[in-house]
Amino acid sequence: MQVFVNEKIFKYAEISLFELHGIHKKDADVIILNGFPTNENAMLKDGDKVTLIKRGEVLSEDELENLMMARHTPQIHEKLKQATVAIAGLGGLGSNVAISLARIGVGKLILIDFDVVEPSNLNRQQYYVSQIGMRKTEALKLNLMQINPFITYETHNVYVTENNVENLFNSADIIVEAFDVAENKAMLINNVLSHFPAKKIIAASGMAGSFSSNLIQTKRPFENLYLVGDEVNEATFNCGLMAPRVAIAANHQANMVLRLIIGDDEV
Amino acid sequence: MVVNGKKLHFETQISVVELLVHLNLNDTRIVVELNKKILPKTQFTNTILTDSDEIEIVGFVGGG
């Protein structure tokens, strides 16, 4: 029979959980059998999955990658690993998009922002009090490295204008528009669609306030333009941006990126 | 012409900029597709529309 030990396959005629523990990692103090932590011995069956963890142990890159890979779907993971996604703006939208894409293992993320972390960002953006004053590109890269150290991060601390769009986004397969200001959104989309007829951009418009989550949709107004949001509720003095709806919109964007990478271009 | 799926007819020739004014749209917060192709903002003034044209306009609001 075959059993999986820390995601690797081993063959045994007959073996108990504790025997396996003794052979593979006798200093492990956490034993997980088929997803459930256990302290009881049991005879193993064909196909059982055992994870042996020593608390506080720093894993080698290989071991950690193998364990993390366990949640990835193999054919999908290969496609994700080959993809390069650029995220323009690392605020409420961009920081949340980046975290989801890092978690699923998109091979390369290009992170672009000119700004630093401010206290007013913390109501919706993926930064910490200790990072106030840091460049968003640097702060987000540090946070993402804690989530997935096995993908490539490229950062650009720069203000995006029509003059640098071509250089910044040339190597990206897919572009995420995650700006705050409406004019900047329009500028980026105009220039990306004009310069790169083969690239797709996923933009967002209308996610302020606490209106129904279900008003936020993903649409495809142009062949290469996807648009997420309710298209109405802009950030104003009386209607601010808040974590839940911004993160909902961001993850609509992230899921559309995922769908495009695996070859499904329908919304 | 068809603008965002609706039929519109103008007695005189109209440019994209004039259409946007007619629709009361701010040209810095939109993107325009003319016959399924993106129309760069620099061409809004000198692009004259005809009855057979299909125009798709997407507007943006702030927040992110």
Image: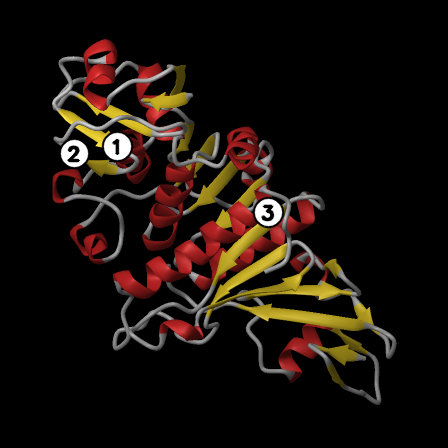
Left or right: residue A103 versus residue A58 is right
Of the numbered discs 2 and 3, the one sitting upstream in the chain is: 2
Q: Secondary structure at mark 2?
A: loop
Q: Which residue is mark 1?
A: A33
Q: Which residue is mark 3?
A: A260
Q: Quadrant of the N terminus of chain A?
A: top left
Q: Chain of mark 1?
A: A
Q: Secondary structure at mark 1?
A: strand
Q: Amino acid at mark 3?
A: Leu
Q: Are marks 2 and 1 on the same chain?
A: yes
Q: Chain of mark 2?
A: A
Left or right: residue B18 versus residue A110 is right
Q: Which residue is mark 2?
A: A38
Camera-nearest residue between A121 and A52? A52
Determine the residue positioned at 63% across, 82% down: B23
As drawn, A252 above or below A111: below
Q: Are marks 1 and 3 on the same chain?
A: yes
Camera-nearest residue between A212 and B21? A212
Q: Position of residue B44 (x, y in %)?
A: 70, 65
* Disc 2 to disc 1: CB gap under 8 Å: yes
As drawn, A109 above or below A230: above
